[in-house]
């Protein structure tokens, strides 16, 4: 059993500020190469190392990150 | 992505935006601290179950539209006059939770008198004071809180004490007033800082519930646009430059100044 996390970014509301990237202890987040409707490179998960700590969501100024966490059988 | 499928289910949700904030897209610049400060206030309101009792007094400044985001009754005050308006509303509705949300230009420049006198009267209000060392809304002019040497639109060669005076630590001044019950200075640039700041906001609303007088929370925040930096760089610059002048921590707790 391992604790695994995942985030869902409301990409249309993300402003690509990068604050969540700095806050993530596991380097899970990067800005996408594509942009949203406002022209911002939005944040996205780039690997499966998320631990569901919610650090990214807590510092996101626009409250666009939701965090999920669960025990997963490896 | 494939690694998410097993995890992203409603029963595994650990964090999402509080419903005490509306779904309106905030007009703040990318990375601005205002959004985070809104959220911790809204989360406390939700957790204390006081959404129908909370009344937001919005300022003039970048957060002038705060009432578009706080899903509570709100009023907009004339520039700097939020503590006066809050006084009136709180006295009319003593069991409600009236809070002001003000920037440093609003609270510590044009509104200095209203701030001082509301605190001196010990009005039972919560004041959220967002100190970003600049007038963000109007394009980055010098504020009373601007640091020595800091370049702004109206101090292009840096703030000069001979010309502009010293950075004003209004929060420390307010701690001298017997009306203030709880005074603290916090920040919201890291997850740990946000959690601590939220605890302070909760303490403030609890004090208000217990009719203790004025609770005043300064939050040292970033104005990455006014400072002309990226948001992550602005947070770093804030730690290195703002915190020495505006140290984080409690200043007055339960009506007693914290000895340093
Ligand atoms: C009576 C009056 N004087 C001046 C202004 C112009 N004005 C608008 S916002 C502002 C200062 C805002 O700075 P601050 O309170 O620090 O808020 P921030 O935008 O930095 O969050 C000023 C001077 C005004 N709107 N009304
Ligand atoms: S902190 Fe929020 S708005 Fe900024 S890039 Fe990350 S998800 Fe987007
Ligand atoms: S929840 Fe924690 S580990 Fe997962 S992406 Fe956010 S900051 Fe990184
Ligand atoms: S101007 Fe400054 S304070 Fe105003 S929204 Fe932009 S970053 Fe925030
Ligand atoms: Mg300001």
Image: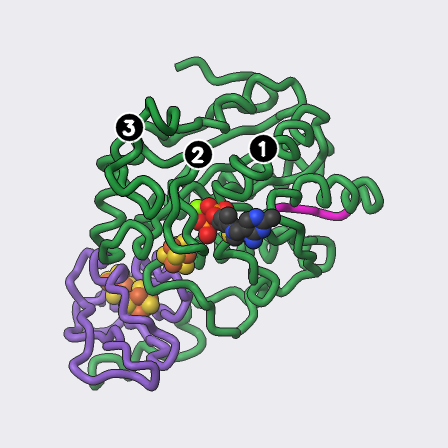
Which is nearer the N-term, disc 1 or disc 2? 1
Vertical order, B83 against B76 (above or below): above
**Nearer-N-terminus badge (3/1):** 1
Q: Is B54 placed above or below B259 here?
A: below
Disc 1 versus disc 2: distance between alpha carbons? 10 Å
Furthest residue toward right: B92
Q: Give the mark count.
A: 3
Q: Name the residue under label 2.
A: B144
Q: Where is residue B165 in the image (x, y as percent from the top left)?
A: 39, 25
Q: To which residue does mark 3 refer? A: B244
* Start-end of magenta stretch: B96-100
- Asked if the residues shown at circle 1 and circle 2 are in contact, with their CB atoms under 8 angstroms apart, the answer is yes
Chain B is shown in which shade? green
The colour assigned to chain A within the rendered structure:
purple
Chain letter of mark 2 equals B
Return the residue at label 1. Answer: B112
Magenta span contains residue B97: yes
Residue B184 position, x and y percent, is 48, 31
Q: Is mark 3 on a helix, strand or loop?
A: helix
Q: How crowded is mark 1: few (under 14 residues within 10 Å), some or many (20 or more)?
A: some
**Magenta span includes B190:** no
Give the residue drawn at x 32%, y 28%. B245
Mark 3 vs mark 1, foreground winner is 1
């Amino acid at each position: 059993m391992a604790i695994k996390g995942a985030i869902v970014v409301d990409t249309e509301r993300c402003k690509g500020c990068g604050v969540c990237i700095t806050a993530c202890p596991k380097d899970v987040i990067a800005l996408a190469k594509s942009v949203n409707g406002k022209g911002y490179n939005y944040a996205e998960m780039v690997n499966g190392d998320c631990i569901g700590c919610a650090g990214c969501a807590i510092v996101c100024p626009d409250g666009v990150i939701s965090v999920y966490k669960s025990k997963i059988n490896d | 992505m494939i690694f998410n499928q097993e995890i992203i289910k409603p029963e595994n949700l650990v964090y999402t935006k509080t419903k005490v904030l509306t779904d309106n897209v905030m007009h703040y610049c990318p990375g601005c601290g205002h959004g985070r400060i809104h959220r911790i206030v809204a989360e406390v309101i939700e957790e204390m179950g006081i959404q129908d009792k909370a009344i937001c007094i919005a300022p003039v400044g970048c957060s002038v539209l705060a009432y578009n985001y706080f899903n509570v009754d709100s009023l907009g005050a004339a520039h700097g006059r939020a503590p006066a308006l809050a006084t009136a509303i709180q006295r009319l509705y003593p069991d409600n939770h009236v809070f002001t949300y003000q920037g440093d230009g609003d609270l510590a420049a044009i509104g200095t008198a209203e701030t001082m006198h509301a605190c001196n009267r010990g009005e039972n209000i919560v004041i959220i004071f967002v100190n970003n060392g600049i007038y963000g809304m109007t394009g980055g002019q010098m504020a009373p809180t601007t640091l020595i040497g800091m370049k702004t639109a109206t101090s292009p060669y840096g703030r000069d004490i001979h010309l502009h005076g010293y950075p004003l630590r209004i929060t420390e001044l307010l701690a001298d007033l017997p009306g203030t019950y709880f005074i603290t200075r916090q920040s919201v640039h890291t997850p740990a800082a946000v959690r601590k700041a939220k605890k302070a906001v909760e303490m403030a609303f609890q004090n208000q519930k217990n009719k203790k007088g004025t609770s005043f929370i300064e939050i040292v925040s970033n104005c990455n646009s006014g400072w002309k930096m990226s948001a992550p760089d602005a947070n770093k610059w804030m730690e290195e430059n703002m915190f020495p002048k505006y140290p984080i921590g409690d200043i007055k707790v339960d009506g007693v100044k914290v000895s340093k």
